[in-house]
Amino acid sequence: MALNVELVSPTQQVWSGQAVMVSARTTDGDLGILPGHTPLFGVLVDGAVSIKGVDGTTKEFNVQGGFLSVSNNRVSILTESVN
């Protein structure tokens, strides 16, 4: 089982694909999201978002605020800007 993940900014789709884990920091603290995670909506703080793909590679992104939504093994990350 995998997560369907999309990371987007106002100007581009930064990353899209399947992952086995997503890590992010919200106003409520650090999150680790695995397949089967309970539905969630969080406000991102400036910092790292890590996506571990099904191929074993890990992508690191530095985001500037935004939102994270988890539902039915789908993770949507909307950020104001990303490096």
Image (cartoon, helix red, strand yellow):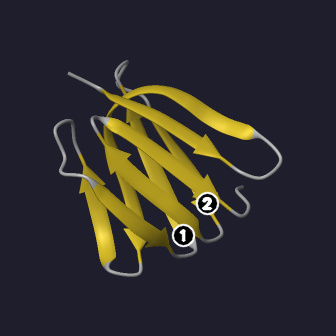
Rendering coords of residue 64 (x, y %): 66, 69
Q: Amino acid at mark 2?
A: Asn
Residue wearing tag 2: 62
Mark 2 or 1, nearer chain start? 1
Q: Is residue 17 above or below residue 62?
A: above
Element marked by disc 2 = strand
**Nearest the camera: 80 or 22?**
80
Q: Residue at x 48, y 45 (%)?
A: 76
> Which disc is residue 47 wearing?
1
Q: Residue at horizontal 32%, vertical 80%?
A: 28
| Quadrant in the picture for residue 20 | top left
> Is the residue 52 above or below the residue 63 in the image?
above
Residue 5 point in image, percent of width and height: 45, 35
Decide: few, some or many residues near mark 2? Use Cα within 10 Å; few <14, some 14-19, many ≥20. Answer: some
x%, y% of residue 12?
A: 78, 41
Q: Is residue 57 left or right of residue 81?
A: left
Q: Residue 16 vs residue 72: left or right?
A: right
The C terminus lies in quadrant: bottom right
Residue 16 against residue 82 in the figure, above or below: above
> In this view, which residue lies farthest toward the right?
11
Horizontal side of 8 relative to 43 (left or right) equals right
Residue 58 at what x, y percent from top left? 43, 37
Which residue is painted at 78% across and 52% down in the image? 10
Asked if labels 1 and 2 touch by Cβ distance under 8 angstroms, the answer is yes
Q: CA distance from mark 2 to mark 1?
A: 5 Å
- Tell me: residue 14, above or below residue 40: above
The quadrant of the picture occupied by the N terminus is: top left
User: Considering the numbered disc 1 on the image, is that residue within a helix, a strand or a loop?
Assistant: strand
